[in-house]
Amino acid sequence: MAIVDPATKQSASYIRPSSWADGLRGIAALFVVASHTCLSFATYLIPPSFAETGNSILFQRPFFRLVIQGQAWVAIFLVLLGFVNSLKPLQLARRGAVADALAALSTGAFRRKWRLVFPAALMTFLAWLSCQFGVFKLGTRVDAYWLRATSPQPSSSLSAAVWDLLRQLVGTWMYGENAYDQPQWALLPLFRGSLYVFMTLLALVNTTPLFRLCAQMVLYTYSWATLDGTVGTNIFAGMILAELSFYNLTALQRRMIFKLLPYGLVTLGLYICSYPDQYADQTEWSSQLASLAKIIFPKDANVSRYYASLGAQMICFGVMLSPTMRRMLSHPVLLWLGSISFPLYLVHGPLMRSVLVYLVYLPMTIGFEPALRADGTPDPESYIPTPSPFRLGVILIIFFAFLLYVVQQWAKHVEPKMGALTAKLDGFSRSWGKNAEWTSKEKAEILPITSVRELNV
């Protein structure tokens, strides 16, 4: 997506019907960064209160605690993935251009995978290189939980370093784990979600819209019942939204109840997304949701992830039903955030473990002496302390400005190269071995197609 100056007036041709999804994706990416910041410097926000019978501060309460609910915003990524990736094939299928829909589906499925893989691999390589040169070493000694837990140690040898790099490059897509860039765990669900969209539309693109909608609802129910609450339910919910977006809902939106419904859905969705990952029994509102989960969720379900997914689906559905909210999310600033959302997601982790760590903690190392254990040796769990809240706040503002600048440069200079690399791979896939003699037979040599009935005669 082209980046537009916020001061530039939006033209009618620029605002697309799905622009709101870009704006919402930008907000989600920003809140993911905020959640990792809170997990580093404000871990007391994880529970909904300070103790089982203690009081809650503002950002431990519903809605406000969304600043630390990273999994809710990842769920929004998945819903929007199902929505956006389905739009063009569905539009073509509704026009009767089934062949064009299949071609768009095939091309999009191929290219989108590599637009995930190539940038992620490059970021992993850069983070690995930084790790081997000891850039993240200070992060392992700081009193910031998320920064310390995600800062990897250098490998013991060159051969071990190369093996570690290969293992993490593969592990990102096989196990959802990457020691050099921990947030890349979400790329595996996104990859699986893209395959869900491709396989579902491949099977249903030639059916009627009503049949397709019912089939998607069945797949959503199946995912819900089989504990696929993170990927399946969100992807199929996004596909259902894409299908419904082609229906004329103008008549319904004129009624007062349908004018209020979108705001109620978004409010309820945000409330549900506030469900804490831990210590839900400490407050009345979260314990009520925990009791409700026993009724509405399948047995052995991950309650926090199911609530995050259900809330994300309500938010997206409510926004789609509201022209006002769609216009708000199509603001140029939000569209710009949406255009850099994937680079922001990739880049923020390594920069937080390097630049932010040095800005915050390097001055604190002056005169710092680790605590001693009983035998007189330094305590390895004696961490470098965090500076005062005021100083930390100033540093965070400076860092976030720097982060957005780096992300902007990544989107401007690196992303186009990743797109060009994907295009070259696409062209290679269409031409490799095309003229080889062994890849084709003369028409007379082609084996005939024989039915099963003929074989049984």
Image: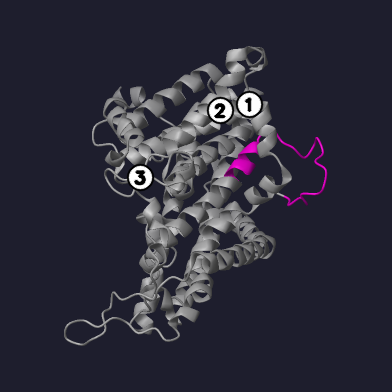
Q: Of marks 3 and 2, which one's residue comes earlier in the chain?
A: 3
* Residue at numbered disc 3: 55
- State which quadrant residue 151 falls in: bottom left
Q: Nearer the viewer, mark 1 or mark 3?
A: 3
- At x 34%, y 46%, the residue is 49
Residue 406: percent from left, percent from top: 63, 66
Q: Tell me which secondary structure the magenta stretch mostly adopts.
A: loop
Per the image, label 3 sits on a secondary structure element best described as loop
Residue nearer the viewer, 318 or 233: 318
Which amino acid is tagged 2? Gly
Which amino acid is tagged 1? Ser
Which amino acid is tagged 3? Asn
**Label 2 Cα crowd, 10 Å radius (few <14 / some 14-19 / many 20+):** many
Per the image, label 2 sits on a secondary structure element best described as helix
Q: Is residue 112 above or below residue 198?
A: below
* Residue at numbered disc 2: 318
* Residue at numbered disc 1: 322
Q: Is residue 451 visible?
A: no
Left or right for 83, reference 334 = left
CB atoms of marks 1 and 3 within 8 Å: no
**Label 1 Cα crowd, 10 Å radius (few <14 / some 14-19 / many 20+):** some
CB atoms of marks 3 and 2 within 8 Å: no
Residue 446: percent from left, percent from top: 49, 40
